[in-house]
Image: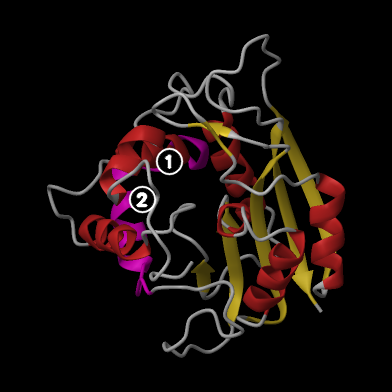
Amino acid sequence: MSAEQEEYEYFKNAREYLEYFYSDLTGEKCPDEGEWMPWSMEQFHRTFSEGKGFGGRLLDIGSGPTVYQLGALAEIKKWKDGNKQAFDWSPFVKHVAGLEGSRWESRQEQLRSAIKDAVPCDVFNTNPLHPAEFEPFDTIISAYCLESACYDKGRSAYAQAVRNISTLLKPGGNLILQTYIGVTYWVDKEGNKTPDSLCLDTEFVLTTLSEAGFTELETSEYKCPVREKVQYSDIKGMLHVTGKKI
């Protein structure tokens, strides 16, 4: 997302955003979503464990659904450098290490060393990483990003954003996408309903990916808990999709 876009009204910096959404794995702070975070990590673990070539040079589009990208980049670089003031991701690393049967400390250091760079990205640009230049990637991940970038621009903008990021992927490369399903509003810290995520459904997402040149689409869906009263959002679920670029 563009660094020039106005930052989130309700989160003045990347750290505040991280503390609000990622301070635990249980979903206790976001009961509308339930235990979606373990589900999300388990989908990534399953995808990379299937031996279908999801590897090589990997690009993560969107370090979270943020529009204050430079602040987010600073947080990523702090963590990569082992800065003691960086956000503590160890509970998440421990969960993944448990799935893999590996030691979390060594897994964390391996991840730090694997991150080669963190650069701004504008999904509305036909060259999203401009002015940086990279060879096409083997795998692209985008999780809970595009729907936030396009929340006030409509589904045609979402489809264009998918086409734009597909140009960063080499032919035969893999896309791993996770997205919210059925969100029409979020409740901000003052209790106001805020439409800051484009409302998507599974059929539209799959059609968009197909029209952008992705085949062999495989999906997994998470259904949010049924609740009588919405506390945080009216989200219906999450979608995990993998596909191969023609």
Q: Is residue 208 part of the magenta span, yes or no?
A: no
| Residue 233 or residue 121, whichever sits in front | 233
Q: Quadrant of residue 209?
A: bottom right
**Which SS class for mark 2?**
helix
Q: Which residue is mark 1?
A: 97
Q: Amino acid at mark 1?
A: Ala
Q: Residue at 59% of width from left, 41% of height from top?
A: 195
Q: Element type at marker 1?
A: helix
Question: Dot 2 surroundings within 10 Å: few (below 14), some, or many (20 or more)?
Answer: some
Circles 1, 2 touching at the beta carbon (< 8 Å): yes
The location of residue 16, given as percent across then percent down, is 28, 41
Colour scheme shown: secondary structure
| Front residue of 47 and 229 | 229
Question: Does the segment drawn in magenta span residue 117?
Answer: yes
Q: CA distance from mark 1 to mark 2?
A: 7 Å
Q: Position of residue 129 (x, y in %)?
A: 48, 81
In this view of the protein, which residue sits in the foreground, 119 or 122?
122
Name which residue lies at 36% across and 71% down: 118
Horizontal side, residue 2 vs residue 210: left or right: left
Whether 55 is drawn above or below 193: the answer is: below
- The quadrant holding residue 149 is bottom right
Numbered tag placed on residue 180 in the rendering:
none
| Residue 234 placement (x, y as % from top left) | 65, 27
Q: Is residue 163 above or below residue 210?
A: below
Q: Which residue does the numbered mark 2 point to in the structure image?
A: 107
Q: Which residues are magenta?
A: 98-119
Write the residue at 52% across / 70% down: 58
The quadrant in which the C terminus is found is bottom right
* Residue 203 drawn at (x, y percent): 87, 49
Can I make out residue 89 in this image?
no
For this rendering, which residue is in front, 95 or 170?
170
Within 10 angstroms of label 1, few (less than 14), some, or many (20 or more) residues?
A: some
